[in-house]
């Protein structure tokens, strides 16, 4: 962290020249902090409180995926606030990229769901965390109920392997979504796999690939494929289902027995922020009530700030097909976590889906 001496609110700089020193006074100079984040979460509602407090906009850099973001920071890029997901932030912490966050300096911390505030592994000691939950969502299958009514009734993910729908289903390209999903289908916990377990999962992935129309995590591509009927079922985030449901397309978001996967994304602070107070203010700004309402009404994810949800109409929850009791809903799912040996898993899935294996 860059540090300064403060004397009565005035910055004092000591210059040692020729064995003596001079005391120079002047106002503290600090430019905007930098936010390194997914594109959707750089919209004005997430920045408004920060801008009001400092009369400036933060600098903004977008990342397309967390591997890209990690590589860029390892290469020397130093943002102040970053937005990884829960399964990713441990890698950033272990690489020495993060500083603990004092939750007493976040006025919106207490508004975050208790379940999310107590996620395993985020504590950095009493009153401090490495990771501040920001928003969450789900991974399951969006299906066309008119084209596959039997699966709308059964709520089964087996449609991915049904010969009847071969070439009309898709899964996501990221291993954090697809690998735990397929492992769960065959009774394996992807977060605690033995080598024998991993062999079984790879075998199931190889069985899957010939059934796929394409592999993509692009919301637009998935929504278009489902809307046109090119796809009958697509592994997707709830945001894809919500956008189609708003358009009154005949779709359902499957919730099979055993629960669906829940991702949690959050905010972390760089180990060397250019201005810690501003970095904390930017984190807090992203947790504001207005930001939370925007998250669920415009993006389709669910905010960590669950207190603000009292302001959201029932119709929004109905469109997402979720209960207003978000705490109970969170407890019913399977939280996505860090995959062990992720680099090996990424390499294997890349080869499998390209037909090399």
Image: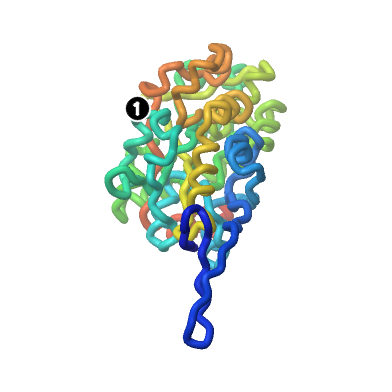
How many marks the image carries: the answer is 1
The residue closer to the viewer here, 25 or 178, is 25
The outermost residue toward the bottom is: 18
Decide which of 180, 121 is in the foreground and name it: 121
Q: Secondary structure at mark 1?
A: helix
Q: Residue at x 68, y 32 (%)?
A: 225
Image side of residue 325 versus residue 285, left or right? left
Q: 9 or 315: which is nearer to us? A: 9
Q: Position of residue 161 (x, y in %)?
A: 50, 35
Which x, y percent locates residue 153?
48, 16
Residue 95 in the image: above or below residue 305: below
> Residue 123 or 146: which is nearer the viewer?
123
List x then y, in percent, for residue 113: 39, 29
User: Seen in the image, is 284 located left or right of residue 146?
Assistant: left
Which residue is identified by label 1?
A: 331
Left or right of 86? Residue 164 is right
Q: Position of residue 273 (x, y in %)?
A: 50, 57
Q: Is residue 163 above or below residue 70?
A: above
**Could you tell me which residue is drawn at 59 percent across and 52 percent down?**
33
Rendered image coloring scheme:
rainbow
Which residue is painted at 55% across and 34% down in the image? 236
Query: How many other residues sit within 10 Å of disc 1, few (<14), some (14-19) or many (≥20)?
Result: few
In the picture shown, does residue 93 fall above or below 45? below
Residue 82 appears anywhere in the view: no
Is residue 89 in sight in this rendering?
yes
Instruction: Give me the residue at 69% from left, 19% from top.
Output: 247
């Amino acid at each position: 962290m860059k540090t300064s001496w403060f004397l009565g609110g005035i910055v004092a700089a000591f210059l040692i020249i020729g064995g003596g020193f001079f005391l120079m006074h002047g106002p503290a100079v600090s430019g905007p902090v930098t936010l390194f984040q997914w594109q959707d979460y750089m919209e004005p509602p997430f920045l408004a409180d920060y801008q009001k407090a400092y009369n400036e906009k933060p600098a903004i850099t977008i990342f397309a995926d967390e591997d890209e973001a990690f590589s860029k920071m390892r290469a020397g890029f130093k943002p102040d606030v970053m937005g990884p997901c829960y399964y990713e932030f441990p890698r950033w912490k272990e690489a020495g990229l993060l500083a603990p966050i004092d939750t007493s300096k976040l006025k919106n911390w207490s508004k975050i769901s208790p379940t999310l505030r107590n996620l395993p592994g985020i504590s950095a000691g009493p009153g401090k965390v490495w990771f501040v939950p920001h928003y969450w969502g789900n991974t399951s299958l969006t299906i066309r109920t008119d084209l596959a009514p039997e699966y709308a009734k059964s709520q089964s993910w087996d449609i991915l392997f049904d010969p009847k729908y071969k070439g009309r289903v898709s899964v996501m390209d990221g291993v954090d979504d697809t690998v735990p999903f397929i492992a769960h289908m065959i009774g394996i916990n992807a977060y605690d796999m033995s080598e024998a377990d991993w062999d079984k999962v790879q075998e199931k992935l190889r069985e899957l690939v010939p059934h796929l129309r394409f592999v993509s995590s692009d919301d637009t591509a998935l929504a278009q494929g489902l809307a046109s009927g090119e796809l009958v079922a697509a592994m997707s985030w709830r945001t894809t289902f919500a956008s189609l449901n708003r358009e009154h397309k005949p779709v359902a978001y499957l919730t099979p027995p055993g629960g669906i996967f829940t991702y949690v994304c959050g905010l972390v602070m760089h180990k060397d922020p250019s201005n810690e107070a501003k970095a904390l203010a930017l984190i807090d700004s992203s947790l504001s009530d207005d930001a939370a309402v925007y998250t669920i009404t415009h993006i389709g994810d669910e905010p960590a700030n669950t207190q603000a949800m009292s302001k959201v109409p029932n119709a929004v929850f109905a469109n997402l097909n979720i209960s207003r009791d978000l705490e109970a809903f969170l407890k019913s799912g399977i939280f996505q976590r860090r995959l062990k040996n992720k680099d090996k898993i990424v390499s294997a899935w890349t080869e499998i889906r390209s037909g090399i294996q």
